[in-house]
Image: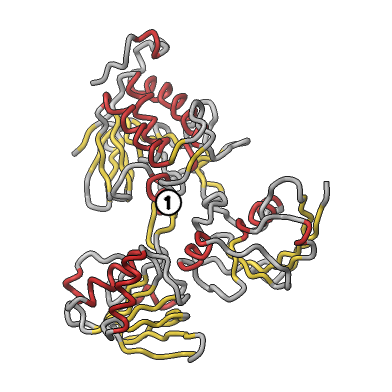
């Protein structure tokens, strides 16, 4: 079990900066994120995009901002549980929160800060009604164990790098048949991967079906065939063992919606005094919260984190006085 | 300031006539949101989600979709020839009378 002062759910910019502000008050933090890397949207969606409204930075690449935040919080040695989604939050007999992840990791703390941004990133699922009947029974959104496709007939959908890379990998002697289905005739992946896929296609090792999409799935207990709609040929039925729809990730609120918090329009309602939620001890900061006048800006999230940790401190140490000090007069950042 | 008229057909088939100013650097996603139409605009207009996916129903000559927009449409569903991301369509005088239909949500 991991024990800390503040469990921060979400390792985006706002969650990372919380570690700094908490650290100044000698509070320890542990971050949990469903993504395998820290940085949230900045790292996952737009690492190479410049941001222009971080005070003091006329322009900073999202990825660089994350790197700088990681550097800034280093003295406070935060813990990380990455690649695991928070599934369950409950209280133990000592009134401490127990936070359990999708892989069963348990975290314990008196305070939770939800800095979940847009929610957890999950694979984008094609809107086919029957698809859920075949999840893990022929339909996979993420390739965990490529060996299971050995000597199988596999269809991959998508036009990005993961679709191209897996098509190449599986077509290289592993799967018995690989088809790649894509909406357009051109691909947006890495040019080198695109060239390789085209070369494999001309050798007949990858069956390229472009200007097409998979529109239906069928089978008896396990996926047996998919229906493909192709622009010129219309509907085509194709027998397959596996279908990998690889359409990237999309955020969803996920289990957070079930923790008894007041939620309005996919956001958590908070009190602007300290960004506390309706559940004592749980705060929500950054893009995931809402209040009158809310703006979803990184800089607002930083402000919210700063005020939030003040209340967190009082909650954790009700008998101690908190003296406010500027970092300039502290004589440097003293970590743990 | 000049204002253009845009018709947005929502997912229930109802038409909404919107007035959009051309001098506020707005895109179609933002216009829909300001009228509280059910467009999420999750990524804030970076062409990085497809929550503002719509179909252009009138024959206006629009700016061409960028690579980023095409890339995102590759990851969207219900994509048709006239599919666009609302956040990449900027309100300007030439779009007066534009008719768009919101694509079904898939997320």
Q: Quadrant of residue A150?
A: bottom left
- Residue at 65 percent across and 59 percent down: it is B89
Q: Is residue A313 left or right of residue B76?
A: left
Q: Quadrant of residue A213?
A: bottom left
**Closer to the camera, B11 or B58?**
B58
Tell me which chain the residue with mark 1 is part of.
A
Neighbour tally class for label 1: few under 14, some 14-19, many 20 plus, Cα within 10 Å: some
- Residue A263, given in percent of the width and then of the height, sits at 51, 46
Colour convention of the picture: secondary structure
**Closer to the camera, A241 or B73?**
B73
Q: Is residue A239 left or right of residue A106?
A: right
- Residue B7, given in percent of the width and then of the height, sits at 75, 64
- Residue A159, given in percent of the width and then of the height, sits at 40, 70
Give the residue at mark 1. Answer: A45
- Residue at 28 percent across and 80 percent down: it is A154
Q: Is residue A238 left or right of residue A261?
A: left
Task: Tell me the element at label 1.
Answer: loop
Question: Is the residue A89 above or below the residue A197 in the image?
Answer: above
- Residue B19, given in percent of the width and then of the height, sits at 79, 55
Report the label total.
1
- Residue at 61 percent across and 57 percent down: it is B88
């Amino acid at each position: 079990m991991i024990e800390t002062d503040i469990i921060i759910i979400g390792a985006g910019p706002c969650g990372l900066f919380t570690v700094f502000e908490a650290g100044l008050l000698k509070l320890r933090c542990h971050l949990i994120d469903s993504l395998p890397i820290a940085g949230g949207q900045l790292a996952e969606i737009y690492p190479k995009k410049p941001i222009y409204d971080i005070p003091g930075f006329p322009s900073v690449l999202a990825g660089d901002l994350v790197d700088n935040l990681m550097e800034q919080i280093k003295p406070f040695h935060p813990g990380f549980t990455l690649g695991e989604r928070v599934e369950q939050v409950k209280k133990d007999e000592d009134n401490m929160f127990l936070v359990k992840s999708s892989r069963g990791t348990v975290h314990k703390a008196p305070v939770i800060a939800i800095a979940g941004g847009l929610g957890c990133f999950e694979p984008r699922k094609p809107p086919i009604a029957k698809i859920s009947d075949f999840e893990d029974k022929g339909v996979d959104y993420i390739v965990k164990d490529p060996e299971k496709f050995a000597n199988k007939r596999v269809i991959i959908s998508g036009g990005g790098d993961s679709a191209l890379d897996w098509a190449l990998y599986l077509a290289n002697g592993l799967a018995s048949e690989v088809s790649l289905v894509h909406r357009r005739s051109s691909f947006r992946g890495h040019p080198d991967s695109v060239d390789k896929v085209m070369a494999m296609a001309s050798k007949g090792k990858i069956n390229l079906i472009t200007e097409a999409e998979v529109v239906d799935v069928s089978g008896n207990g396990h996926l047996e065939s998919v229906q493909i709609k192709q622009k010129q040929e219309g509907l085509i039925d194709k027998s397959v063992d596996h279908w990998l729809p690889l359409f990237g990730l999309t955020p969803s609120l996920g289990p957070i919606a079930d923790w008894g918090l007041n939620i309005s329009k996919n956001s958590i309602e908070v009190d602007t005094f300290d960004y506390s939620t309706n559940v004592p001890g749980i705060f929500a900061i950054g893009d995931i919260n809402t209040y009158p006048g809310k703006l979803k800006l990184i800089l607002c999230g930083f402000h919210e984190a700063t005020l939030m940790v003040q209340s967190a401190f009082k909650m954790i140490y009700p008998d101690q006085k908190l003296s406010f000090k500027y970092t300039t007069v502290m004589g440097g950042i003293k970590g743990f | 300031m000049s204002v253009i008229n845009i018709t947005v057909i929502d997912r229930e088939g109802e038409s909404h006539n919107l007035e959009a100013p051309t001098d506020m650097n707005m895109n179609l996603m933002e216009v829909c949101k300001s009228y509280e139409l059910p467009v999420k605009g999750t990524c804030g207009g970076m062409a990085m989600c497809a929550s503002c996916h719509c179909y252009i129903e009138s024959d206006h000559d629009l700016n061409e979709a960028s690579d980023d927009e095409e890339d995102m449409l590759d990851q969207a569903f219900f994509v048709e020839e006239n599919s666009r991301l609302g956040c990449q369509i900027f309100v300007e005088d030439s779009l007066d009378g534009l008719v768009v239909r919101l694509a079904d949500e898939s997320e």
